[in-house]
Image (cartoon, grey):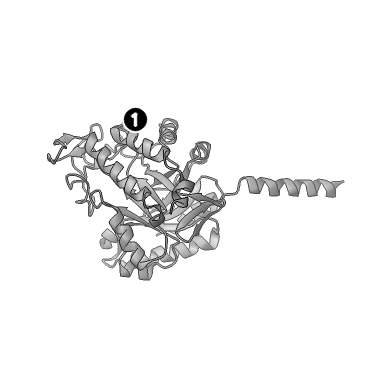
């Protein structure tokens, strides 16, 4: 009788593992989640409340409802979420997570301390996880690596190898600033796909065309977007707050990428909510802010870092939220791929 109970228990556990499986694989230029095609309709998510400078998930339920409404299926965070309740909420809303590990984050699941692998071991079986992402635009900062960017590329590749030893079910990527050059591609051989942060006015396809000439690995937009402030008057866009400029730019970029879906594995729009902590007093929205290689931000060539949100700090929807919502909700991955 005990043996029979054991057999039933074993069968039950096997069936549960199948139901809760979360296998993400790269197949040629595509992502598959549990065997189904998956295209990232994503948004960067670093929610810092008004008047604060640190991330908080106090508005997570409202945020996830807004994301779901907008057809968003993926979020990218800039530091790991070490909170099981938050991860479970993502599963509830059917939203996947790109987990980014920094190089030196004072030992908080970072690459330098090696603690990133503790996070991988802890959460690798959680259904929210889509992929592991190592670093964010570090190619712009060789000074962080003794003046030699090769030190970063070697650390990145070693970390990828280590993750693959412990997790066979999720791909590893990096978020590179614009196009990965020969040096980057030559030293970083173990990642499964490349993320690129691209600010090339409203013409992101140019990087995909470059990429197709040098690599067969999948590529996705780890950041793509525009802000809602114009530092100058240009064409139909007046100087000052301009939700129209942001909405037009984001619509053009996203539509171009989706109309050429065979060239990429996904889009992460930068970003979900305005970041009032970036350029000045976190109690108010300031003009300014700076990011490396950001002169290609449409339509004024200036990255006003506190104005990139699809929603404002109070979660009011901007014009760009509505346009992204329309595009993402009308996008069907099976139809898109069948048309290629």
x, y percent for residue 23? 56, 53
- Residue at the left extreme of this rendering: 233
Q: Residue at x 84, y 47 (%)?
A: 4
x, y percent for residue 190? 44, 66
x, y percent for residue 335? 47, 46
Count of numbered tags: 1
- Residue at the right extreme of this rendering: 1
Quarter of image, res 43 = top left
Residue 97 in the image: above or below residue 263: above
- Residue at the front extreme of this rendering: 339
Q: Residue at x 47, y 53 (%)?
A: 131
Mark 1 residue element: loop
Q: Nearer the viewer, residue 14 or 262?
A: 262
Q: Nearer the viewer, residue 75 or 36?
A: 36
Find disc 1 in the rendering and name its residue: 315
Where is the C terminus found, in terms of image quarters? bottom left
Residue 220 visible within the image: yes
Residue neighbourhood size for the residue with mark 1, other residues' Cα within 10 Å, grouped as few (<14), some (14–19), many (≥20) = some
Classify residue 207 as left or right of residue 73. Answer: left
Q: Nearer the viewer, residue 302 or 101?
A: 302
Q: Residue at x 46, y 51 (%)?
A: 337
Residue 169 in the image: above or below residue 249: below
Residue 115 visible within the image: no
x, y percent for residue 318? 29, 32
Classify residue 210 as left or right of residue 338. Answer: left
Residue 231 in the image: above or below residue 205: above
């Amino acid at each position: 009788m005990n043996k029979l109970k054991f057999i039933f228990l074993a069968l039950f556990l096997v069936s549960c593992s199948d139901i809760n499986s979360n296998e993400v694989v790269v197949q040629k230029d595509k992502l598959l989640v549990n065997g189904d095609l998956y295209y990232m309709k994503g948004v960067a998510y670093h929610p810092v409340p008004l008047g604060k400078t640190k991330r908080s998930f106090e508005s997570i339920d409202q945020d996830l409802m807004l994301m779901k409404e907008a057809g968003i299926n993926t979020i990218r965070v800039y530091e790991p979420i070490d909170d099981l309740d938050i991860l479970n909420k993502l599963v509830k809303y059917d939203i996947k997570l790109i987990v980014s590990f920094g190089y030196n984050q004072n030992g908080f699941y970072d690459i330098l301390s090696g603690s990133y692998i503790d996070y991988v071991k802890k959460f690798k079986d959680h259904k929210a996880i889509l992929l592991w992402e190592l670093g964010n635009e570090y190619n712009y900062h060789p000074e962080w690596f003794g003046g030699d960017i090769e030190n970063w590329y070697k650390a990145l590749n070693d970390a990828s190898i280590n993750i693959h030893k412990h997790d066979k079910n999720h791909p590893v990527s990096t978020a590179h600033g614009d196009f990965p050059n020969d040096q980057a591609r030559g030293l970083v051989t173990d990642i499964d796909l490349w993320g690129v942060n691209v600010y090339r006015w409203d013409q992101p396809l140019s990087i995909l065309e470059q990429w197709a000439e040098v690599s067969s690995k999948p590529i996705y937009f780890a950041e793509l977007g525009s802000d809602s402030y114009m530092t100058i008057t240009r064409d139909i866009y007046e100087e000052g707050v301009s939700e129209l400029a942001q909405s037009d730019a984001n619509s053009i970029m996203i539509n171009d990428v989706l109309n050429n879906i065979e060239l990429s594995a996904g889009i992460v729009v930068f970003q979900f909510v305005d970041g009032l902590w970036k350029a000045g007093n976190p109690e108010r929205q300031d003009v300014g802010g700076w990011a490396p290689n950001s002169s290609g931000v449409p339509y004024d060539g200036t990255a006003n870092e506190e104005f990139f949100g699809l929603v404002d700090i109070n979660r009011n929807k901007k014009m760009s939220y509505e346009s992204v919502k329309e595009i993402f909700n009308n996008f069907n991955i099976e139809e898109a791929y069948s048309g290629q």
